[in-house]
Amino acid sequence: MLFQKKIKPGHMLLYLCLIIFFILSFVHTNNSFAGSSSSEELYLTILHTNDEHGALIPHSPTVDYHPYREDPTIGGYARLSSAVNEIRNEKLASGEPVLLLSAGDYIGGSAYSWLVPEGYAPEITIKQAIGYDAVVIGNHEYDYGPDILAEYFIEAGYPDSHDQTVVLASNTAAPPEHPLKVNDLYRDKELIELDNGLKVGLFGLIGKQAVSYTTANEPVQFEDQHETARQMVEQLKNEGAQLVIAITHSRVEEDVDLAIDVDGIDVIVGGHCHTALYEPIIENDTIILQAGSLLEYLGRLELAYNPETEELRIKNKENDRPFLIKLDHNIPLDPDVNELIDTYTDKLNQFLSEKADGQFEHILGTVVLSDYVIPNEPPLQESPFGNFVTDAMRLVTEEKTGRKIDVAIQANGSIRGSLEPGTMPHALGQVSVYDLTGLIGLGIGPDGTAGYPIVVAYLTGDEIRRALEVAVLLAELMGDTYFLQFSGLRYDYNPQNATFLTIPFLDLPVPTTRAVSSAEIYTGDGMQGFDDQYYEPVKWGDQELYSLATDSYILSFLPMVGDMLPQLDIVLKDKNGNPLTEDQLDELIIYVEGSELKVWRTVLEYAAAQPEGESGLPEIDSYYASSAERINQVQTMPLVTWPILILVLFIIALYFLIRKIRSRKAT
């Protein structure tokens, strides 16, 4: 039988050495992202968030929050702080360092960001209190312009505050004389030596799509993302970085492209597209992360790095740690951070009362009731909440000005979600000021206060038809963000007729300007109904003037259409039909008692003016439970088939003509 012979002592020692060698070889033969740990490894936990959008408090909806009961709300910086502190304390016991990072868009979305133009810096100040190590600048940080952004960082103590929470913007190029640059308010990169000796290099990027979404970044420009990343990796490696982390406000697709094209990035902490990555994406040995949006999750990545082999591996699964931690009712509020938030709530209440003439005094107060959700979907279609917003713009502006407003327009990109009433017993059906304004509160007006102002211009019927063609074209070429919602009209269109074709190599679409098959103006009073007797057709060539209410941002784009598509030129006019120059557009802003009439105010007032229910509070009309047949896709023969059909008929006619000529010659 095997192994019956005695093993000599010398051979026994040899066998033991071979066995030990085999075990050690097996331990060290593992890939970069999985395997057993080594005593030489250095550990690091990366915590990350992105796209917080001013969501300081629990929400979705906020009225459901209850301090002592289970509730469905998510997020809030006070919950985040408790979750972060728990992990820090856990890791402190084992001597493991923790980095907390934000991938941008912490400004913009909630009413708390309205305090930014007022000289406050709530979001970044709270991040400093929680102990963020680094943040990047996203596209919404430019919502109020780079000058106000500079004041924002100065208010938060920068440039000195870089020592606490560094602001990174590696491919951002502010002019040398701009306050962002003069005051060193952002940095290209940062090298951090952690307590365990691990040297981590950080840099930050804003992505291509995010750049295209910035609304007021001039004169700040942005450099090529991949070339900048290559430079940052090289510089950080030369400075001794063992790990390189890119914090990007891009989107997952751009992050994957970056990882493939640029070697040497160990981790990408991403943002912009609001994607919750429950498992990291690994591309070209780069770990790609993203944690959703609005502080629904705290991202958690646990790493082990071997400085001898330079191997990096993920420890989450062996430590039984999820990559995303839900910030829900199970996580208590950090009392210190909650108290800091309360100070900003008081400031916001003062602002609200002043700008709404005392009609709304508390941001968390109930403004209206609803027994159903009013959705802003499906994408690329008329939506019930889009109808609610545009009706508010049309009807409240009509009330404030005392003149007929024919049409109102708003873009899906400015409508931030569906209107969700409370579901808890203590808040059933309630809609707060905070929850409502968070859906329609972006932008800034010439008065320097938050919110785009309402503007009213006049167009001919022919130009209304052109505007509808532009609406179809924008949605087809640029997606749902540019889809326009309407009040005061209805129209039929075939999206397949938006363009004839796309010119190869140039990727240049050729518009038909005939995608809209019919359009009608609503002539009745109040909320737009369904009765055909209150609609009149708007035809090509119609020179009658119609009033158009929209916001200042959308209005600024309408005159640009003619520069690209002369056949769809739109000339803004005053009520007398006089054309207006670009310098005169501010004259179209609507003022109420000396203040700009903001879009968010029209929506609040329209909600408060809904019919009173049995509770004595206004209740949203059931009309908004579904769409109202304003924007209707229809199936018509694609225009591109007409020239083909004509060509076919011409060939057939030519064929029979030739045959006829030949038959005559034969006889």
Image (spheres, helix red, strand yellow):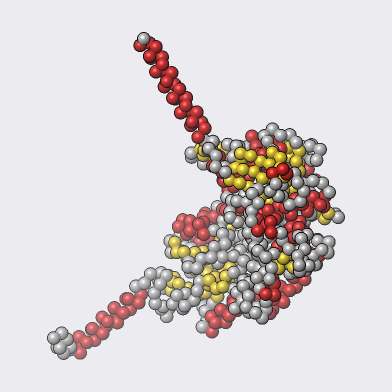
- Please state the horizontal and vertical placement of residue 210, each as a whole percent of the image: 59, 55
* Towards the viewer: 285 or 310: 285
| Quarter in which the N terminus is drawn | bottom left
- What's the residue at 69%, 59% (across, down)? 622
- What's the residue at 67%, 34% (across, down)? 540
Count of residue discs = 0
Classify residue 543 by image quadrant: top right
Question: In the picture provided, is 212 more to the left or to the right than 570?
Answer: left
- What's the residue at 58%, 45% (across, down)? 633
Residue 135 visible, this angle = no
The vertical placement of 58 against 549, above or below, is below
Classify residue 142 by image quadrant: bottom right
- Please state the horizontal and vertical placement of residue 385, each as a whole percent of the image: 66, 57
| Quarter in which the C terminus is drawn | top left
- Please state the horizontal and vertical placement of residue 568, each as a whole percent of the image: 65, 37
Looking at this view, name the residue that lies furthest to the right. 593
* Towards the viewer: 490 or 364: 490
* Towards the viewer: 315 or 479: 479
Classify residue 192 by image quadrant: bottom right
The vertical placement of 636 against 662, above or below, is below
- What's the residue at 48%, 58% (across, down)? 256
Residue 86 visible, this angle = yes
- Please state the horizontal and vertical placement of residue 432, each as a whole percent of the image: 72, 67
* Towards the viewer: 477 or 493: 493
